[in-house]
Each structure stands twice: as C-alpha cells, then as structure tokens.
Image (cartoon, helix red, strand yellow):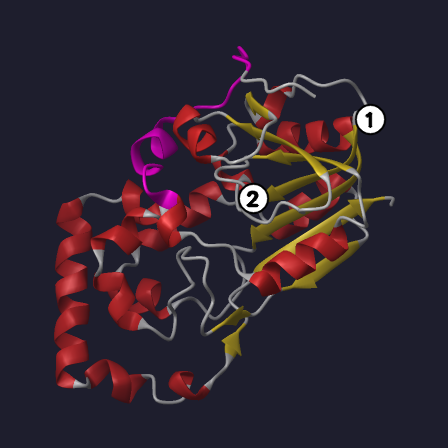
Amino acid sequence: MEQTREEHNGAAPAAVYDRIGIGYKNVRRPDPRLAALIRQALGGARTVVNVGAGTGSYEPQDAEVTAVDPSQVMLDQHPGPRKVKAGAEQLPFEDGAFDAAMAVLTVHHWTDPHRGLAELRRVSRRQAVFTWDPAHRPELWVVDEYLPEIRQVDHSRFTPLAEVVEALDAHTVLPFPVPHDFTDGFQTAHWRRPEAYLDPVVRAASSTFATLPASVVEPAMERLRADLESGAWQRRHARLLEQESVDYGYRLVVAGQS
C-alpha cells in the first residue's frame, strides 16, 4: 500500500497535540509490558488500524498497520508508511476493512466517543481499546494532594468504562496495574518517581498538564518540590514506595472476534 496522508473533513480537533506533540515520543516511550497485553488482545491480526495513533506506540510489528490521527504534528513523528489524517468519528475506510482496530489512551480526545467507537466496530472485526476508568479509586496522589484541578479536567473528558464496554459490546476487560518503572510517560507513569513531575518536559507530554494554566500547575509543583526536599512526601508515601505496581484504573477493553 502506498503512503497516504489524506485530509478528511471529519477530522477531530487536533489543537492540543499540534501544540504538545513536538518531542512527545522522547517522553512517551512504549512499555513492553503494555505492548505485550495489546498484542495479545489483537489476536494475531494481519491488518490493523490504529486510531489516534500518535507516534505509533504499541503497534504490532508483525502486522500491516494504518495509522490514523487528526494531528499532522503527530503523524510527522510516526515512522510507518501508511498514515491517514482523520478523526475517529468518520473513518475513511470501508466496512470490515481491517482485521483489528486499536486505540490507546485516545478516546477521551474524541469529539464524539460513542460515534468513534462505533466506527472502530464498523471498520474492523476485532477491537482493542486502552482507556482509563474515571470511577476507579485510589486516585493518583498528584491529583489528591497537589492538583485537584486535574480531577475536574479528566472526569469531564474520559468516557466511563461501562459506557466504553457497552459501546463496543466488549467481551473482555483486562486491568493494567502501572509498574513503578513504566516507560510510557503518561500522567500516572511516575507514581513512584515524584521528582519526574517537577520536569516541565515530562509534564508537557501529558495532555491534562498541558491543558491547565501555568498559574495553577507551577505553585502546585513548588509545593511538591518543598515536600520532597523536606522528606514530607516520602513519609506520607512510605508504603507506596514499597510497591512494584499500582492499579490506577487503566483497562484494556477487547471486543469482536479474532
């Protein structure tokens, strides 16, 4: 298949990732443990469409992958030969065009998640969607102790897990506890490495952090810095520092047939 970069009138807004996407792949490095889970969920698919593909994280190396993203900045960083600029809500493919569809931490960016999930089902025979359950507890300590504003932003964006499961008519929901040395620097990745949140480059790779104004984020990070320097954070989280992984509500939702 020839390289394609199609403009599509139904593309979802790409403003956030056009702004934060430069250098994104340096912080968001795919973790092999999550990659293995997603690869297994794809059921050996030969052709895969990755919706909200970004820089191509977690795409199976042994499949023919078509990357779809509304942001040209992200597509320019994608290494694959098959790239389509489009939004999830109106995929420019025929019914059943792919063996499988995948979507990794992207549904919350779609303008119409239910329509986008219906499109995944339309163009593929199997679907694997990695998302976050906003109803899950415990919360990440950054939210609870320093930036409760994140709670409001994330709860307004993320589709409840039950709705994702229903929309896909999913048959399997797999939990993914986040390892302490997780390499993909999304918001929760650094739960046992608190100093990472002080790095503006790390924060810039999280769409939630990037959404909040500096007037909110910077004072919160100064409080975190002070707590780390005084040892207050370490005392509060002594038990957390002993854990290898924590379930913060990330789920892989699997639907369709192999």
Label 2 crowding class (10 Å Cα cut-off): few <14, some 14-19, many 20+?
many
**226 versus 10 height, above or below:** below
Instruction: Tell me which residue sits at (71%, 53%) in the image.
Output: 39
The type of residue carrying mark 2 is Thr
Where is mark 2, residue-wise?
Answer: 159
Could you tell me which quadrant the N terminus lies in? top right
Q: Is residue 11 magenta?
A: yes
- Looking at the rendered structure, the secondary structure element under dot 1 is loop
- What residue did someone put label 1 on? 96
Q: Which one is in front, 93 or 79?
A: 79
Judge the density around disc 1: few (<14), some (14-19), many (≥20) Cα neighbours within 10 Å: some
Q: Nearer the viewer, residue 109 or 25?
A: 25
Element type at marker 2? loop
State how far apart marks 2 and 1 are (Cα): 25 Å
Instruction: Kindly identify the residue that appears in the image at 17 percent across and 77 percent down.
Output: 227
Would you say 228 lies left or right of 163 here? left
Does 50 appear in magenta?
no
Residue range in magenta is 6-24
